[in-house]
Image: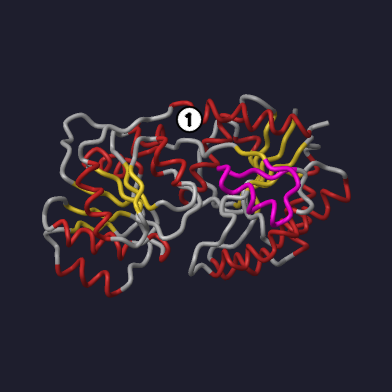
Amino acid sequence: MRAALVALSVRGAMGQYLEALFAELGRHCQLYLFVPRHFAAESTAADRIFRFATGTNRIRALLQLVNLVAAIRVWKQVQAIRPAVVHVFNGDGYPWTLVWAFLAQKQGLPLLVTVHDPEPHPGNMWEWLNARLRPYVLRRATSVHVHSERFVTAVRAQGARDVKVIPHGSLAPRFLRYWKPGIQREPIALFFGRIEAYKGLETLVEAGIRLNGKAKVVIAGPGRLPWVTLRKIERHREIFELHNRFLEDWEVAELFQRASVCVLPYRQASQSSVPLIAAAFGVPVVASAVGAFVEDVPAVGGLLIPKDDPEALASAIIRAFEITPTYPKELEFDQIAPRFAQWYSNYAG
């Protein structure tokens, strides 16, 4: 079976997910990957990776992604491999994807679409615009994939007719290869990931102050912290350790080896790769009871707390020190990929 896997966003965790999926799914079908030029992952199947221009920054990317001539050009590249199915991995509400959905429907080509965020994250205008166009794509999609049963109703309400649930695969092996002997656990509560307004870092900082030295709080990842939160961190340097930048894989591994608890104090969420990474390193998870965390965090033996509650978060961090997490190896990509291959096969004709 020949299939085209198309992605419009390949930075950060999204690119890591795509890299892992392509490597394993390519063992089950003749898979071709279509990605922006800046997709930098190495692959033994480089001859099956096709790159296209999307712009080097957000403004240029936006201008390119409203260029419908460019969308048709990429679609013709996809058509040239004569796929049995086309899987749009992300960008479900981008203008290009809307064009592809119309063309696929007109040509009778099965179009499968993954929706990572059925609801836009608060404060993200890019996602808000994406959500406005998404229903026009989902109505024309042959089948729609989500990562949790919690999102089936949401995508059906946006026009999806057939919905497939396949859980988020584990990115832990990517980081576990950098495990080093001799790194000691410390009483650290670790937040790892891109810093966004909806991720509740203000709540974590307040919880850290309440802990009053019982645990150190490490915040690691790129993004902009609110200046009020940053000032609190600076006034309590004995409590907080800040790595406000992109971290290399080996640095991530070292932080998880040092940490005793992983915290996800989100105000709103879809799903995250972090709980599985933490569990693989033997680090228990404390997270807000939002989105797919309601399923994903108990699956690794973690604790759920109310969002925006610093007292509950501080208390849960202390309780989590005594928890031994569970790591579900059945969520690694060698186990997940056959489920995607079967999904493809259902519509390949």
Locate residue 339: give its quadrant.
top right
Task: Tell me the magenta residue range.
Answer: 143-163
Q: Is residue 23 above or below residue 275?
A: above
Q: How many marks?
A: 1
Residue picked out by circle 1: 332
Q: Which residue, as the protein is rendered here, is positioned at the far bottom?
A: 228
| Residue closest to the eye, 341 or 44 | 341
- Residue at x 14%, y 62% (from the top left corner): 237
Q: Position of residue 139 (x, y in %)?
A: 77, 54
Query: Horizontally, is 132 left or right of 176 in the view?
Result: right
- Residue 247 seen from this side: yes
Q: Element under label 1? A: loop
- Residue at x 45%, y 46% (from the top left corner): 294
Q: Is residue 66 above or below residue 151?
A: below
Specify whether residue 136 is painted magenta. Answer: no
| Residue closest to the eye, 225 or 269 | 269
What crowding class fits label 1: few (fewer than 14 Cα within 10 Å), some (14-19), or many (20 or more)?
Answer: many
Q: Position of residue 123 (x, y in %)?
A: 48, 69
Query: Horizontally, is 53 left or right of 186 in the view?
Result: right
Q: Position of residue 89 (x, y in %)?
A: 63, 46
- Residue at x 63%, y 54% (from the top left corner): 154
- Residue 178 seen from this side: no
Amino acid under disc 1: Glu
Q: Is residue 161 above or below residue 244?
A: above
- Residue at x 17%, y 52% (from the top left corner): 216
Query: Horizontally, is 202 left or right of 36 in the view?
Result: left
Q: Is residue 141 above or below residue 234?
A: above
Classify the position of the N terminus by image quarter.
top right
Classify the position of the C terminus by image quarter.
top right
Q: Position of residue 87 (x, y in %)?
A: 69, 42
